[in-house]
Amino acid sequence: MPEPAPRSGPHKVLLAFYALFTLAAGARAAVQLLTQYDEAPVAYWLSAAAAVTYALGWYAIRRASVGHTGFASVMLWVELGGVLTVGTLSLVERDWFPDASVWSDYGIGYGFVPAVLPIAGLLWLRRQKQQAPEGARAGA
Amino acid sequence: MQSALHTPLGQLTLVAAGYAGLVTLVALVTTVRRVPRPAWLDHMVWILELLLAVRAVAGLGSMLGGQRPEEMSAHVGYLVASVCILPIAMQSISDDRGTWSSGVVTVAALAVTVVAVRLQMTWGHGA
């Protein structure tokens, strides 16, 4: 049976943020990996990983908006873990980050939106799980 | 950014950034008021898109005329993003006039504001 189109709701704003950050982190990582790889390869690969995380997060939220919350339950925690780990490492191990990655200092270069985004997503997901029918959840 | 005011391209970028900031603010107020997305907000978005398209053509003209931005690849990336973000955002809410669709406009207009400022920064030498 085809899935119904996602309803209007706050997930549309989350999807906009995730699409935007997929683009921003992906383009940034691509340019830096191609033009200045030797300056800070760890930071640039972490930015590429952030871009992949945002792309998967976008897909996860889209699925969760039609009731399949399973993937989002994993992905949003992975994303939060990534932001907190990279953010902390960038403060503790400054030598590893001669140049910033997207998640350096908990996303300070992006107004801390990378730190707020997974938390907002998890809060939305919690409400979504309460509203989603049991059958749809079982199919996730 | 100081010398930006002395060139037509820099002035155009600042106008685009300022107007994008205004659209962001208006879209945010519309979202917070929790009313359906009004048609005039769409009109504001398309006027902004027109402004950005003119800015992109002018920027491209400058580059083809021999001027080079200080950060070429980043600048071209921002130039492409500046004209793509709003149409994609509007397409994603084309069948949705709910209050949260104004939130999408807020996010897109905010992104365009930042992109316009970054366009000026990556150009470097007074646009």
Image (spheres, rainbow, N blue to C red):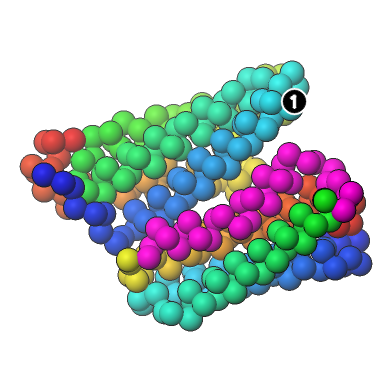
Choose between B32 and A39: the one closer to the eye: A39
Check residue A138 for magenta coloring.
Answer: no
Q: Which quadrant of the view contains residue A33? A: top right
The residue that appears at 51% across and 27% down in the rendered structure is A49
Indicate the quadrant where residue A70 lies.
top left
Q: How far across and down, in percent of the image, does residue B30 sit?
A: 45, 75
* Disc 1: which residue: A36
Q: Which of B101 and B90 lies nearest the eye of the viewer?
A: B90
Q: Which residues are magenta?
A: B65-94
B70 left or right, relative to A128:
right
Tell me what residue is drawn at x 13 percent, y 36 percent: A139
- Percent position of residue A23, x then y: 54, 42
Of helix, strand and loop, which mostly describes the magenta segment?
helix
Residue lying at 64% horizontally and 60% vertically, measured from the top left: B113
- Rendering coords of residue A76 (x, y %): 37, 36
Image-based side of B45 in relation to A56, left or right:
right
Whether residue B79 is situated above or below residue B33 in the rendered picture: above
Q: Could you tell me which chain the residue with mark 1 belongs to?
A: A
Q: Amino acid at mark 1?
A: Gln
- The percent position of residue B115, horizontal first and vertical second, equals 66, 54
**The C terminus of chain A sits in image quarter:** top left
For residue A82, above or below residue A128: above
Q: Is residue B25 left or right of residue A3?
A: right
Residue B88 is inside the magenta segment: yes
**Closest to the observer, A42 or A28:** A28
**What secondary structure is found at the residue carrying circle 1?**
loop
Looking at the image, residue B94 lies above or below residue A79: below
